[in-house]
Image (cartoon, helix red, strand yellow):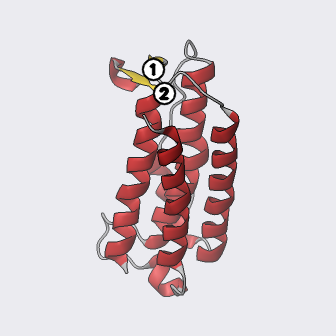
Amino acid sequence: MDFAYLKDLMTHHAKIICLLTDGVSAEQARWKPDVDTWSILEIINHLYDEEREDFRAHLDAILHRPKDPWSPIRPFEWVTERRYNERDLETSVQNLLAERRESLAWLESLGAPDWGTSMPAPGGASISAGDMFTSWIVHDQWHIQQLIQAD
């Protein structure tokens, strides 16, 4: 696994997200083509919560507390429970960027972790630190694709 390359992708993803949300009006940010599709605001706030409550938290648990139980997340419920679509886009993007900077600093502080370390995940399977880290990158890319399609 090329840790430096994946970490660089995370930096680039943050820049891409900025570019894709720059100049988007409040109305555009809240627009949804149908009830099952997330708005730009919902995507951004989902990324924000996943950054701090899923990927970084779970990767930290895998690397440092692999015997602990998997902390549950509820990303689909959070969209409505946390009222993502009622938030301000610029504030939401800045929140995401601040969390991304924190994630990048945290990743840098890891040194040379054992990416093969794993822990039980929901559904009975185990997930390795390397798989969790690459999933974080793919998750970004999936939602960047959604932002592109929303523009």
Read off the residue under disc 1: 116
Q: Is residue 81 visible?
A: no
Q: Which residue is mark 2?
A: 129
**Can you say whether 2 is above or below 139 in the image?**
above
Decide which of 50, 73 is in the foreground and name it: 50
- Which corner quadrant holds the N terminus? top left
Residue 151 x/y as whole percent: 37, 81
Residue 137 left/right relative to 112: left
Q: Which residue reaches farthest top? A: 67
For the point 47% across and 18% down, the residue is 119
Determine crowd level at label 2: few under 14, some 14-19, many 20+ residues with C-alpha closer than 10 A. Answer: many
Count of picture labels: 2
Is label 2 in a helix, a strand or a loop?
A: helix
**Sequence order check, earlier mark of 1 and 2:** 1
Residue 3 seen in the figure? yes
Label 1, residues with CA under 10 Å away: few <14, some 14-19, many ≥20: few
In the image shown, does 124 or 140 lie closer to the viewer? 140
Say above or below: 83 vs 105: below
Disc 1 residue type? Gly
Quick check: 2 left or right of 62?
A: left
Residue 89 sits in quarter: bottom right
Q: Residue at x 54, y 82 (%)?
A: 22
Q: Amino acid at mark 2?
A: Ala
Residue 29 location (% of width, % of height): 48, 79
The answer to whether the residue labelled 1 contacts the one labelled 2, judged by CB atoms less than 8 Å apart, is: yes
